[in-house]
């Protein structure tokens, strides 16, 4: 970087020495000689920009003010758009016809103001969807939307070209006067500007950021009430959108087409000025309208006088100068506001007051002209004003692009468990921003505008990157949810600012003042956004209630019965689908039927004696036998092994058998059809004949109804080592009536041929009931043990989290991962049911209980915040999520419920220059001063400047947002 600047100084000096005296070059050389003396000082303070920042800033400034474009969302887009726009301006110089020039500038100005890459991408996806539409008709609305948008743009372009050519050809030769056609259009532009400004301000909560808007809804606590009272303002927004999108651009094209300056061809100033203006009409309509009104008023006041404005400048250059002056003046006002906030709060805020504060304030007063000059120069260069260490010591930051950071937008973020909440809310927030930006309720939004959104503990930072005709590109960042002390202090002030604007207005005066006017945050509006509300409650009185805990076991049995029945029922559906697939394969490929598609119903048939594999079958095996002997003489063992391998995917569990699984097999445990290939019976352990184990044996099951096989649970799930006496005692707790009711609610629609009394036969099948008695009681034995005691709250919490206290049956239960997950799911459902019964009242009947469980299954995720499934449920927008937790500090158990609903998110506009200045100081302090102290002054809480939140929102590694989106295209049509 330093050799480059030295080379520039030397090149200018040599050019001055070896060329004819040119006044501008001579003055530039003299100024650079003076600046050359201060180069070490400028380098030390980091005022001179790096080369990449310098070139990007230069292209951005030329594109915006010289060519009528907009700052772009990426460096590549900036370079491409700069080259195309510059080529358009150069090409207009060589067009010989005035009408051709007007048509060329109007057409390319409109085309370049569109987001061409997004339109091309949408068109590509539309074509792909259209080609695939023969199989799916779901893409129809999307195709119609794209074509509708395309025809809208084509219509607007055609009308603009017709208007510009006709007006220029038939009425573009008259000079400007108070009665000329151009003057009449000027009056229309003035009226449009006033009307649009009023319609924009009337939609914001504060007028001019100071007075409470009497037309804005006073009650914004609920979405329904807010939307009802907001309807009038929404109509105002629609009117303003029509004026901004259609009426104003055509009025401005009429103003430009009627200008007599376009009659002078082959003028560089005309090509640059009018190319920029015809582009600005579409790219930045509001600013273009303001510039034309300013030029028109000045023209009306000075049209008879012989001044430099009339004599030397054409309309295009006047508009260019008006645009530069407008931008720099607005920057100057924002910088003065920021400087005043830094200066005043250094004394008024007690925590910001230091020993040197009085001295710094005095120096600022004494050297006020110098301070004002620094602010003016930073505004003139469009560079951030840097408050050194955020103290009232003001320097000029180096010029940089409006995005402030060099990397791609959204490329980095400090991803953590909180990131998913922002990932979920961003699409809905972008959709809400679409109407807010289009209607003007967020004020004048330009590239570089910053907004802050607040809902509960979530803070979303929005940066406008790029803006054009009917579109806007934004970057949305999410700040950390686990608040530090500094974060909490500033977040509390943000809540105060929004509450004063939106929630404390029911009994306020009609024109109440904004008591936080000096804050860099100004409330704008509230947006309805679909996101999760977070409710946390203490479960004291529920989880420690003896009655609730006593009922927990009985409810667990009922819930587990329902879950097991649903599991087997869904499994039978899957087998039916697999059977249909098998038949289709057989019809299509009758000669090549793979083993993987054997009949799925075959493994559900009743187990006959000749197919069974019981303890008697292997009674001849002894401890000294060679299990791996492949001698043909051992026909019995070989036959039994062959029969086991030939069994149609039926996995039978034998007490004492061992399962050997490979790593690949363990991953495929969830596929029922592959279980046979993982079971290899090796043998039984030696049994002590002197001790008899009174455990439940594995009897053969003969169903009275053949369809009961569809609901049969796997046999290995009912082999828990429960003593027979204990099983008979626990059998009384099995909810038989509930079991019958659950079965009666099933419908076997997937079966084509079924008897009319199918449910009745299945319900009366005692063998099937015995299966469920064994399976349910085995799980209860694994979770709670054999003791019939009331579980303690700590036991309930540990069981809910999966860390079940050890008991005799736990090893057996955890040895069957699928059953263990079902039992854990049943326990969590049971706990949620206990909480609901405690808060909503007892369950009246079985039908209500079924409704509870079906709702849990379809609309809830009940688990832990740390689960991967919790994150997936948030991203899939599950309506409700429930979790159980424990607060070790207070010693209480807590619940957390996330509810997906449309709620109001409060949005405020930040002072752009305050953000840029603090980010410039952050960059200077860490990169130049290398002050990386985590407790440094410049990142401490500042309730007016929101210093800590601003630092968080910076791009990593200097900032630490937990989420940062890529550039989001927000249509404003």
Image (cartoon, helix red, strand yellow):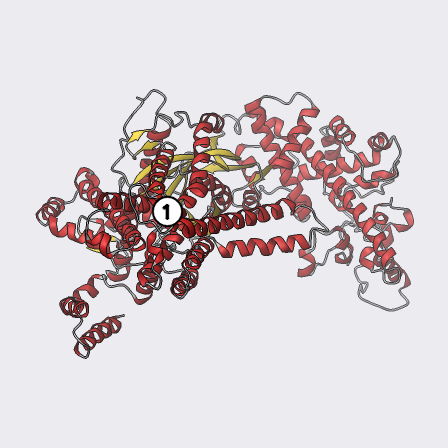
- Identify the image quadrant of residue 781: top right
In the displayed structure image, the side of residue 962 where residue 6 appears, left or right = left
Q: Nearer the viewer, residue 757 or 308?
A: 308
In the displayed structure image, the side of residue 598 where residue 560 appears, left or right = left
Where residue 833 sits: x, y (%)? 60, 30
Q: Nearer the viewer, residue 639 or 240?
A: 240
Residue at image coords 16%, 78%: 17
In the displayed structure image, the side of residue 145 where residue 730 appears, left or right = right
For residue 491, above or below residue 153: above
For residue 583, above or below residue 874: below
Residue at image coords 42%, 28%: 220
| Residue 314 visible to an observer of this rendering | yes
Which quarter of the figure is the N terminus placed in?
bottom left
Where residue 437 sits: x, y (%)? 42, 41
Where residue 831 sits: x, y (%)? 59, 32
- Label count reads 1
For residue 753, above or below residue 271: above
Please give the residue where the numbered disc 1 appears in the rendered image: 255
Element marked by disc 1: helix
Q: Nearer the viewer, residue 760 or 795?
A: 760
Where residue 819 sits: x, y (%)? 69, 44
Is the residue marked by circle 1 packed among few (<14), some (14-19), or many (20+) residues within 10 Å?
many
Q: Nearer the viewer, residue 689 or 572?
A: 572
């Amino acid at each position: 970087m330093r050799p480059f600047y030295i080379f520039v100084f030397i090149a200018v000096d040599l050019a001055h020495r070896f060329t004819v005296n040119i006044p501008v070059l001579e003055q530039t050389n003299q100024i650079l000689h003076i600046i050359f003396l201060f180069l070490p000082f400028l380098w030390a303070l980091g005022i001179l920009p790096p080369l990449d920042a310098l070139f990007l800033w230069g292209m951005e400034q030329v594109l915006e003010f010289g060519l009528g474009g907009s700052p772009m969302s990426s460096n590549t887009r900036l370079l491409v758009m700069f080259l195309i726009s510059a080529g358009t301006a150069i090409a207009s110089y060589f067009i010989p016809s005035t009408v051709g020039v007007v048509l060329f500038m109007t057409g390319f100005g409109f085309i370049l103001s569109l987001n061409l890459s997004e339109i091309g991408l949408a068109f590509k996806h539309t074509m792909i969807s259209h080609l695939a539409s023969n199989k799916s008709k779901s893409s129809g609305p999307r195709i119609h939307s794209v074509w509708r948008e395309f025809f809208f743009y084509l219509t607007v372009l055609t009308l603009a070209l017709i208007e510009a050519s006709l007006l220029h050809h038939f009425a573009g030769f008259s000079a400007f006067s108070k009665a000329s056609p151009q003057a009449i259009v000027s009056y229309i532009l003035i009226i449009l500007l006033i009307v649009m400004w009023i319609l924009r301000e009337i939609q914001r909560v504060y007028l001019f950021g100071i007075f409470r808007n009497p037309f804005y809804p006073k009650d914004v606590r609920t979405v329904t009430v807010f939307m009802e009272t907001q309807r009038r303002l929404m109509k105002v927004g629609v009117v303003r959108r029509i004026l901004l999108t259609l009426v104003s651009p055509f009025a401005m094209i009429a103003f430009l087409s009627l200008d007599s300056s376009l009659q002078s061809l082959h003028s560089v100033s005309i090509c640059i000025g009018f190319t920029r203006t015809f582009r600005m009409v579409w790219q930045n309509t509001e600013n273009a309208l303001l510039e034309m009104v300013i030029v028109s008023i000045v023209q009306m006041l000075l049209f008879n006088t012989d001044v430099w404005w009339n004599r030397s400048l054409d309309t295009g250059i006047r508009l260019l100068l008006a645009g530069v002056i407008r931008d720099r003046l607005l920057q100057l006002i924002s910088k003065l506001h920021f400087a005043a906030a830094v200066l005043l709060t250094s004394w008024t805020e007690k925590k910001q007051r230091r020993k040197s504060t009085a001295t710094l304030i005095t120096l600022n007063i004494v050297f006020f002209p110098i301070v004002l000059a620094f602010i003016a120069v930073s505004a003139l260069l469009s560079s951030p004003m840097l408050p050194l260490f955020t103290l009232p010591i003001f320097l000029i930051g180096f010029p940089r692009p409006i995005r402030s950071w060099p990397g791609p937008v959204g490329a980095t973020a400090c991803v953590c468990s909180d990131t998913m909440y922002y990932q979920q809310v961003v699409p809905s927030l972008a959709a809400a921003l679409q109407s807010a930006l289009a209607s003007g309720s967020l004020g004048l939004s330009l590239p570089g505008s910053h907004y802050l959104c607040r809902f509960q503990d979530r803070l979303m930072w929005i940066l406008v990157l790029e803006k054009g005709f009917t579109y806007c590109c934004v970057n949305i960042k999410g700040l950390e949810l686990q608040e530090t002390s500094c974060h909490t202090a500033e977040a509390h002030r943000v809540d105060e600012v929004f509450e004063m604007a939106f929630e404390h207005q029911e009994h306020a005066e009609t024109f109440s003042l904004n008591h936080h006017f000096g804050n860099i945050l100004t409330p704008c509006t509230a947006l309805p956004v679909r996101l999760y509300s977070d409710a946390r409650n203490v479960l004291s009185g529920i989880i420690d209630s003896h009655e609730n805990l006593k009922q927990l076991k009985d409810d667990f049995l009922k819930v587990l019965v329902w879950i097991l029945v649903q599991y087997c029922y869904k499994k039978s559906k899957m087998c039916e689908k697999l059977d249909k697939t098998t038949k289709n394969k057989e019809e299509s490929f009758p000669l090549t039927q793979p083993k993987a598609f054997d009949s799925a119903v075959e493994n559900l048939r009743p187990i006959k004696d000749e197919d069974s594999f019981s303890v008697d079958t292997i009674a001849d095996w002894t401890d000294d036998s060679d299990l791996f002997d492949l001698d043909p003489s051992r026909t019995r063992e070989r036959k039994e092994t062959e029969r086991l391998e030939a069994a149609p995917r039926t996995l039978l569990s034998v007490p004492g058998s061992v399962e050997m699984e490979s790593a690949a097999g363990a991953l495929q445990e969830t596929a029922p059809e592959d279980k046979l290939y993982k079971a290899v019976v090796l043998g039984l352990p030696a049994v002590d004949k002197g001790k008899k184990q009174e455990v439940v044996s594995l009897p053969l099951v003969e169903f009275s109804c053949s369809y009961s096989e569809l609901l049969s649970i796997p046999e290995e799930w009912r082999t828990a080592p429960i003593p027979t006496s204990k099983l008979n005692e626990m059998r009384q707790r099995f909810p038989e009536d509930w079991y019958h009711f659950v079965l009666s609610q099933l419908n076997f629609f997937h079966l084509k041929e079924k008897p009319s009394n199918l449910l009745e036969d299945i319900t009366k099948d005692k063998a099937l009931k015995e299966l469920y008695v064994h399976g349910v009681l085995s799980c209860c034995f694994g979770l709670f043990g054999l003791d019939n005691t009331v579980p303690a709250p700590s036991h309930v919490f540990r069981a809910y989290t999966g860390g079940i206290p050890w008991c005799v049956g736990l090893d057996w239960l955890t040895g069957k991962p699928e059953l263990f997950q079902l039992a854990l799911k049943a326990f969590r459902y049971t706990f949620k049911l206990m909480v609901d019964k405690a808060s909503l009242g007892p369950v009246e009947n079985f039908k209500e209980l079924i409704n509870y469980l079906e709702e849990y299954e379809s609309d809830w995720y009940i688990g832990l915040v740390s689960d991967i499934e919790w994150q997936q449920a948030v991203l899939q927008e599950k309506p409700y999520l429930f979790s159980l937790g424990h607060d070790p500090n207070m010693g209480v158990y807590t619940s957390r419920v996330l509810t997906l609903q449309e709620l109001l998110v409060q949005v405020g506009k930040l002072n752009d220059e305050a953000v840029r200045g603090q980010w410039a100081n952050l960059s200077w302090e860490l990169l130049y001063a290398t002050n990386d102290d985590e407790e440094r002054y410049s990142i401490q809480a500042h309730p007016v400047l929101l210093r800590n939140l601003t630092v968080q929102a910076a791009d990593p590694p200097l900032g630490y947002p937990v989420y940062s989106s890529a550039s989001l295209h927000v249509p404003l049509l």
